[in-house]
Each structure stands twice: as C-alpha cells, then as structure tokens.
Image: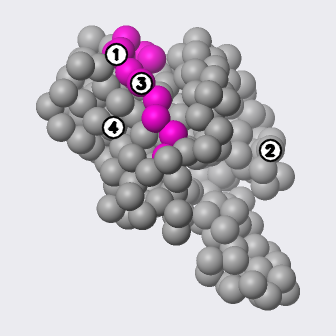
Amino acid sequence: MSDRLYFAPNTISVVVAIALEVAGRDYELVRVPIGPDGADSPNPFRLVPVLETPAGSVREVVAILNYLADEVPAAGLLPRAGLARAEANQWLTFCASSVHPVMKLIFRAYRYAGQDEAAQANLKAHVVPVLERTFATVEAQLEGRPFLLGDTWSMADAYFGEFSAWGLNRIGLKGASGPNVARHREAYLAHPATIAAKAREKAATEAQPNPTPA
C-alpha cells in the first residue's frame, strides 16, 4: 500500500507532497473539500493535509514532516536529532503558528470579520503589518546563509518557501521582496521536488474537479 495524501488546491498540503517527493515515497493524491463543506474529511477539523500511511494516519504539517523525516532519515528532510532537529522544529512551528494563521486572516477575512466589507478591510489593514514584521525576521535569519538552518537545506525551507510565494503573489507583501527572502524563494521554486509536487497537484486537481468527501 502506498501513502495517500488528502489535499486541496492552493493550500499548504503541497509542502507534504514535496516531502514525499524528496523521500522517494510512492503516494496518491486525493482531493477533498475543506472548511464547512468538508464534514466527512479524514481530518475532524476539516483541514488538509492528512497523510494516510500503511502504519496509520497523521495530520498537521509539522507532525507529518517529523514522521517522514524519521521514516526516511537518509532523505535529509530534517536533521536527525539533537539541537539541530530542535532548531528545525522551531522554524516549522514558526511557520505553523506565526505565519499560516495570520495569512488565514487575510485569505478568509469573512470568517473572522463577517460579511461586512469594511470590517474585512480593517482586519486586513491590521494584519498585513504583522506579516511584514514576520517576514523581516526571516530576512534577517537568511542574511549570509542560503537556508534557514545555515548551509543545510531542510523541509523548513520548503514550508516557509511556499508561504513566501503566497506573500508575494497573493498578498503583495513588501517583505516578500526582500533580497534574502526573494533569493530563498527562488531556490525553493526551482527545487526539483517542488516542481514535481506542484505538477502532480495540478494534474490531480484537474483529474478531480469535484472533490467528494473521503
């Protein structure tokens, strides 16, 4: 049995697909609805990604990436142990707790501010500066180093790299154009695993235009 990755287009589930590509795992992409329409999703919180493996299911990006890193240590998804692994998890958690939730406030402002457009605009106006400061932190971290952990690539780079692309293309953050962040994002987008995962996600999205509950 191969792995099965439950995904939705234009979500962070693509990062798990990248990890599966790097690890050389055989996997299938299954598109599912999320949010209010995802009542029967494999994730009780109606979110993606969910990775179904022969050993069981795992949800949440940070948990999935750590699981895969331990399952295929030779792939180098994350440092194997010790302080280096802890530092990688610092950046994974940073992405999961300081970047993604704030971006959701922009992408789905109606969920938090209601249907009033003025209220949504006010929310976004307060949120964007928070993201700018977040990206400034990464800009400083990348000064004089190619990757978040220094000279060694890890899935933390893929995780932030996808958010960096969102920040530039979907939000228009000034911080996404900082020289270090821009260089880092270009390397992420040019990574063979990124290219392969995005191509597979596009093909799966086109082949499954109307997702059905899992």
Dots 3, 1 in contact, CB < 8 A: no
Separation of residues labelled 4 and 1 (CA atoms)? 12 Å
Task: Tell me which colouring the rendered structure shows.
Answer: one colour
| Residue placed under numbered mark 3 in the picture | 28
**Position of 199 relative to 108 (above/below):** above
Q: Is residue 60 visible?
A: no
Query: In this rendering, is residue 54 above or below 112?
Result: above
Q: Which residues are magenta?
A: 20-32
Q: Secondary structure at mark 4?
A: strand
Q: Secondary structure at mark 1?
A: loop
User: Is residue 44 part of the magenta span, yes or no?
Assistant: no
Residue 174 percent coordinates (x, y): 82, 52
Type of the residue with mark 1:
Arg
Lateral position of residue 3 relative to residue 96, left or right: left
Q: Residue furthest left?
A: 55
Could you say which is closer to the camera, residue 188 or residue 56? 56
